[in-house]
Amino acid sequence: MRLLRMGSTGPGVQLLQLALNRAGFGELQTDGIFGPLTERAVRRFQSAQDILTDGIAGRDTHRRLLPWYTGSLLYRIRKGDTFSALAERYGTTVEAITLANPDAKPEDLQIGDTVTIPLPFPVVPTDIAYSAALVSFCVRGLQMRYPFIETGDIGQSVMGKPLWYLKLGSGDNAVLYNASHHANEWITTPLLLKFAEDLAAASAAGENIFDYNAAALLDHASVTLIPAVNPDGIDLVTGELQQGEFYRGAVNIADDWPDIPFPAGWKANIRGTDLNLQYPAGWEEAKKIKYAQGVRGPAPQDYVGPVPLSAPESRALYDYTLAMSPRLTLSYHTQGGEIYWRYGECEPEGAKKIGELFAKLSGYTLADPIQASSYAGYKDWFIEAFDRPGFTIEAGRGTNPLPISDFDTLYKENLPILTYGALVT
């Protein structure tokens, strides 16, 4: 998290405001503008934490706010503590604490031991703009609250940010979902993160996800989610990246494309390579098409790169997919309410039937992409390389970037796809 003070703006400020609200230090509007009310709330929090009370959210303040960023706190057991007493103190439940501490013995808590206390709110926010930092907090928070979730990274972005994955389930039906190849389609990132949280919570509670028993789903399948393929680009589009060498580089690229709004029209990674035009499936044809359209070098969108897989983000997902060898993939994009299921003449067995089910459940249209957009994408490469069902989901409708106010509708439309994607192969 960057240093935030009076006059700061962006997703980092929205997250700060949300955390202060969660911690009980204000009823702030999460507008992303660090004004007098936010400064007063920061001062009250700093005073309560007995740290420098300067109204500036720097390293110490962010560190103290970590429980309200991630949704869980680490607590050192004291004499007389019980899970029941801790649940009452922190407004949570014994069941939530027990789930978060599978190795603890509630009847024999040892003084000095550290336990995780889930706090009484969801980990994944769905009403604020996203940033790479927020993705990291969500991944960490979900793993703390649900230790059966496996987390890690598949590599790093241009700027060195982790490309996180979350894995749920132990079944043989391995599926892989990814989101936010394109920066201005970042709303698909919370889509996958919320699905991970809802699936984990339903499984732990013995409840259904959509209309299927979540625990049974995770016995049948293993679901791996890569929620942010392009974290640097997300930070640029949402306004978290506002200065520095990489920001200036993006501005210089955008200056050559005045007809593309900046940063709202930015799809590429931070170096101006379109990550979903980087895969070795008709890449030369994609290059020919985009060059004919005038995109011959780094651009906010549609630059195929100097060679396939030159971008570290695309290379990381390519390598991870090869190692995992999933039976089905979903690639989340926005917008248009369409589902793409084939690559050229490649039609994996059963793919059309699955796509028809997805279309029926979501209300989206099963479609074929236009020729100019039907090469070098992740879905294209997966279908060609594995001859297995791979889908691009163009979620929602409107103009990119879709507003976060669309999230609830987007999630309702796509929850059945995300659920049945793990079941149908």
Image (cartoon, rainbow, N blue to C red):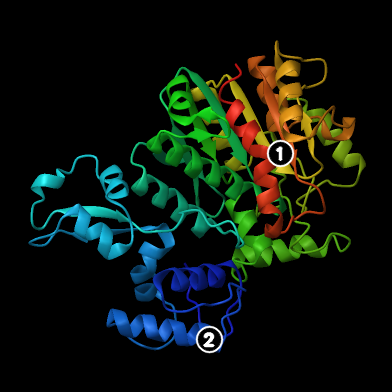
* Residue 13 image label: none
**In this view of the protein, can residue 181 be seen by the observer?**
no
Residue 294 % position (x, y)? 90, 47
The mark tally for this picture is 2
In the shown orientation, is residue 244 left or right of residue 197? Answer: right
In the foreground, 74 or 410: 410
- Residue at x 62%, y 62% (from the top left corner): 129
Residue type at tag 2:
Leu
Residue 292 % position (x, y)? 92, 40
Residue 4 % position (x, y)? 50, 77
Please determine whether, in this image, residue 263 is positioned above or below residue 413: below
Displayed quadrant of residue 315: top right
Q: Earlier in the sequence, mark 1 or mark 2?
A: 2
Displayed quadrant of residue 81: bottom left
Viewer-nearest of discs 1 and 2: 2
For marks 1 and 2, give the CA distance: 42 Å
Residue 301 % position (x, y)? 78, 49
Circle 2: element type: helix
* Residue 37 image label: 2
**In this view of the protein, can residue 83 be seen by the observer?**
yes
In the foreground, 229 or 177: 177
- Residue at x 13%, y 54% (from the top left corner): 113
In the foreground, 399 or 23: 23
In the foreground, 172 or 206: 206
* Residue 276 image label: 1
Q: Kindly indicate whether the residue at mark 2 contacts the one at mark 1 (C-beta within 8 angstroms).
A: no
Which residue of the protein is positioned furthest toward the right in this rendering?
292
In the shown orientation, is residue 35 left or right of residue 380? Answer: left
Please determine whether, in this image, residue 128 is positioned above or below residue 311: below
Q: Could you classify mark 2 by the number of other residues whose Cα lies within 10 Å: few (under 14), some (14-19), or many (20 or more)? A: some
Residue type at tag 1:
Asn
Circle 1: element type: helix
